[in-house]
Image (cartoon, rainbow, N blue to C red):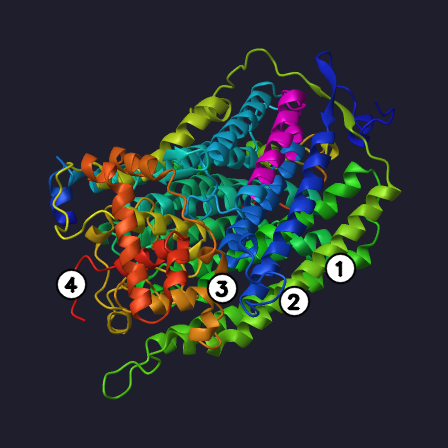
């Protein structure tokens, strides 16, 4: 029964194609963006929750280790 | 107003002009913290009662009391622990972290006040209405329409407060936790509105605008995304704040957090159909649910790894710090549950697990482990901070940790055992091709010991919570609460000067409202693509011709079935397996449910499936079984329903009900509506005549019972599944 319902919708075959294209494009672009982030920027962002004396001002404070990614 | 300045601001040299002094609102955080603990204890206590009701169903404390029957208590438990315990936990964590991540006080103290008290009033209304049987009959969305409206209003208050705080912020960049909060807010709004669309009949009764398969799909799109966007995303946000705070180190990989955030919110939306595998839901929707559920492992484990690896090289601090212990086990439980979930979404695994206690065990790994332990970890960190003291007893916190962990294990492992045992018993055939365990009750009796263990596990978990309550109260008493925590931060520069070479993606980070919009669009893509096809149908879609709307008496009976929460223990969905068709009859077809507003497929078989119970047993059997299940089925754990034999069937809303159904597209004729009461009386008389003929009632009993609710329930039971002629 559902085959008939789906068939009666115009252009239904393009739904999954559109979906996968949107999905793929979005995440490829996101991946490029994330990889291209500057290290300093990443450090600043990841330190936002921490107390001020553990922010980027005092970069000698290195118990946090080096950001790998 | 306290004279003590926040430590961090005295240590910090003021930068330049533009440094603004303000204070963080800790009062609202404290209020939400108290509510979290209070409702946590209450919700878990109700859970313990529910667990005990499954092993001593006729215990004097609840036997024969409608408001305390399992079918009403179970939704009270689920709503309490999800919306009252975790809900307040979310707000506690969000209100604390958001202010500090944005370096601003909440936008409006008034909105905070309204949010808090509004939410508690909603909880109170649930506490009153659910035991009274005012329910929509849809899991985790049982609250009736006036309360739904209240939820929407308070949710908007919360959103306004949060979004305007973001607008007012002094930290330009939105830390990942805030994205999780925003995604939570947007998606819960959509989920709540769409799934709660109902046609009211009276002040506390409504019918879902969706029916049958459509309702099932909407319900589980909602239900799984309630897990995703109420139990997961806000808590991931809290994880991203509180683990770095407790460990005093930044999150392992900020880049990973960006990727897994977007992947999570996009993929999660599609996973809902994994609750409907091997049901009458169309195959394409089931497959989508399976595939996306498996893909979900990646972003979920991204979050888990990020949380755990934040502690790389600092694991010895976990040994000494109960806060970190709770947070680490919480994240580990999250990893477990988000691996188990996708496994359960595989059709062949689901064929075994669906309707069993394995699902319940899985749920509680997530709720006790992830939600519970993360909440406890945050509370142990937060309360000393708010009261500017040390935790009263680290030793007791560690004891809580071990008690709680033991509780989780004793809760879930017996249920895994029970789930497998029962499922395999359901499916066991002998050499001649007949079911070995023909009597469903035998499969229940086999797992009663596991149910006892589970109750003990839950009790142990709750005892751990009591230890925490004592510890936190003692901490509060020895400390000095600071309602407004003074701090200072530089105001945002009025215009942002683009640094040369800045990548063009940077602009969305600085534009939270656009971010909100894009997040909304992403989750709507999944929503639309899954839900739209089932709605783009012509109204003259061929249905099963033999399927007719319920008669007035059957409709009343169905509404009593919903009121009593029968769906909590009984399914109405026979899967296309030989073990099910042998036991229950022809498997359930989509077309049979077209007039079911709401659907009642159920998620669990504590008792047998009822979809084809019609004409299987005599009217007398149902009469005696509802009055005292154990008289008919010795050892049964079903509660007794004596009040159905005393309550008069209320037909005052019968006309309104039929009209509501007509508006929803159920083809009652106007003549049928006019004749409803007579039709009902005639059908009731037939049933009573049967009961007399079968020797169950004498004449005076028959006259007495004619207008009682039990007759309506019997009518509904006898109707179920009889529209199509099966092979049996």
4 vs 3, front mark: 3
Q: Nearer the viewer, residue B550 or B692?
A: B692
Q: Are marks 3 and 2 in contact (CB under 8 Å)?
A: no
Asked if the stretch drawn in magenta spans residue B100, the answer is yes
Q: Are marks 4 and 3 in contact (CB under 8 Å)?
A: no
Residue at image position (28%, 46%) is B552
The picture quadrant where one finds residue B52 is: bottom right
Which residue bears the numbered disc 2? B406
Name the image quarter holding the C terminus of chain B: bottom left
User: Upstream in the sequence, badge 1 or badge 4?
Assistant: 1
Q: Which residue is mark 1?
A: B398
Callout 3: residue from which chain? B
Which is nearer the N-term, disc 4 or disc 2?
Answer: 2
Q: Earlier in the sequence, mark 3 or mark 2?
A: 2
- B598 or B478, nearer to the observer: B598
**Mark with earlier residue (1, 3):** 1
């Amino acid at each position: 029964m559902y085959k008939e319902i789906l068939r009666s919708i115009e252009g239904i075959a393009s739904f999954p194609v559109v979906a996968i294209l949107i999905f793929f494009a979005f995440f490829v672009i996101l991946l490029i963006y994330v990889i291209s982030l500057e290290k300093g920027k990443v450090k600043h962002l990841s330190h936002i929750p921490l107390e001020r004396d553990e922010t980027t001002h005092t970069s000698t404070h290195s118990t946090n280790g080096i950001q790998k990614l | 107003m306290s004279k003590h300045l926040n430590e961090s601001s005295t240590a910090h040299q003021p930068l330049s002009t533009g440094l603004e002094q303000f204070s963080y609102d800790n009062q609202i955080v404290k209020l939400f913290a108290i509510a979290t603990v209070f409702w946590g204890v209450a919700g878990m206590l109700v859970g313990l009662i529910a667990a005990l009701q499954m092993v001593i169903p006729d215990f004097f404390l609840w036997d024969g009391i409608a408001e305390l029957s399992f079918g009403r208590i179970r939704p009270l438990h689920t709503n309490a622990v999800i919306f009252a315990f975790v809900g307040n936990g979310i707000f506690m964590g969000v209100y604390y972290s958001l202010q500090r991540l944005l370096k601003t006080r909440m936008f409006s103290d008034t909105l905070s006040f309204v949010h808090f008290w509004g939410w508690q009033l909603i909880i109170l209304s649930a506490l009153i209405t659910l035991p009274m049987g005012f329910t929509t009959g849809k899991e985790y969305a049982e609250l009736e329409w006036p309360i739904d409206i209240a939820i929407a209003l308070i949710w908007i208050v919360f959103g306004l407060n949060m979004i305007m705080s973001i607008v007012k912020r002094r930290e330009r960049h939105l830390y990942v936790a805030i994205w999780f909060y925003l995604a939570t807010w947007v998606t819960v709004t959509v989920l709540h509105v769409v799934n709660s669309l109902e046609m009211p009949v009276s002040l506390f009764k409504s019918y879902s605008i969706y029916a049958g398969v459509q309702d099932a799909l909407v319900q589980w799109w909602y239900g799984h995304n309630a897990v995703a966007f109420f139990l997961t995303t806000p808590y991931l946000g809290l994880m991203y704040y509180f683990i770095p705070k407790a460990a005093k180190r930044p999150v392992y990989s900020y880049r990973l957090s960006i990727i897994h955030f977007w992947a999570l919110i996009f993929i999660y939306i599609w996973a809902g159909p994994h609750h409907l595998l091997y049901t009458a839901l169309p195959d394409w929707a089931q497959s989508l649910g399976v595939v996306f559920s498996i893909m979900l492992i990646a972003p979920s484990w991204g979050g888990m790894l990020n949380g755990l690896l934040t502690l790389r090289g600092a694991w010895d601090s976990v040994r000494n710090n109960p806060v970190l212990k709770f947070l680490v086990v919480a994240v580990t439980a999250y990893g477990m549950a988000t691996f188990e979930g996708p496994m359960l979404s595989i059709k062949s695994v689901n064929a075994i697990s669906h309707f069993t206690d394995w699902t319940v065990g899985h749920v509680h790994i997530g709720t006790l482990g992830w939600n519970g332990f993360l909440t406890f970890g945050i509370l142990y960190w937060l309360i000393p901070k708010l009261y500017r003291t040390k935790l009263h007893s680290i030793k007791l916190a560690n004891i809580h940790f071990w008690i709680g962990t033991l509780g989780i294990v004793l809760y879930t492992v017996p249920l895994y055992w029970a789930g497998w045992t029962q499922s395999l018993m359901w499916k066991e055939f002998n050499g001649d091709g007949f079911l070995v365990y023909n009597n469903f009750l035998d499969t229940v009796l086999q797992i009663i010991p596991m149910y006892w263990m589970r109750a003990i596990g839950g009790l142990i978990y709750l005892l751990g919570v009591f230890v925490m309550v004592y510890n936190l109260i003692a901490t509060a008493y020895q400390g000095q609460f600071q309602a407004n925590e003074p701090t200072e931060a530089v105001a945002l520069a009025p215009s942002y000067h683009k640094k040369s070479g800045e990548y063009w993606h940077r602009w969305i980070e600085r534009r939270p409202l656009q971010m909100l919009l894009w997040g909304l669009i992403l989750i709507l893509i999944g929503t639309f693509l899954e839900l739209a096809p089932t709605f783009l149908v012509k109204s003259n879609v061929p249905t099963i011709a033999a399927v007719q709307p319920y008669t007035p008496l059957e409709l009343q009976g169905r509404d009593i079935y919903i009121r009593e929460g029968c769906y909590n223990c009984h399914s109405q969905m026979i899967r296309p397996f030989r073990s099910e068709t042998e036991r229950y009859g022809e498997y359930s077809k989509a077309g049979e449910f077209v007039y079911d507003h709401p659907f009642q497929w159920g998620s669990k078989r504590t008792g047998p499936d009822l979809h084809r119970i019609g004409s299987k047993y005599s009217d007398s059997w149902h009469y005696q079984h509802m009055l005292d299940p154990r008289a008919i089925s010795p050892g049964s754990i079903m509660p007794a329903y004596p009040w159905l034999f005393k309550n008069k069937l209320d037909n005052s809303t019968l006309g309104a009900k039929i009209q509501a159904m007509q508006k929803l597209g159920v083809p009652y004729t106007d003549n049928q509506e006019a004749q409803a009461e007579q039709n009902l009386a005639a059908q009731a008389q037939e049933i009573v005549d049967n009961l007399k003929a079968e020797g169950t009632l004498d004449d005076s009993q028959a006259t007495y019972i004619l207008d009682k609710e039990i007759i309506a329930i019997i009518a509904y039971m006898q109707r179920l599944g009889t529209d199509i002629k099966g092979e049996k």
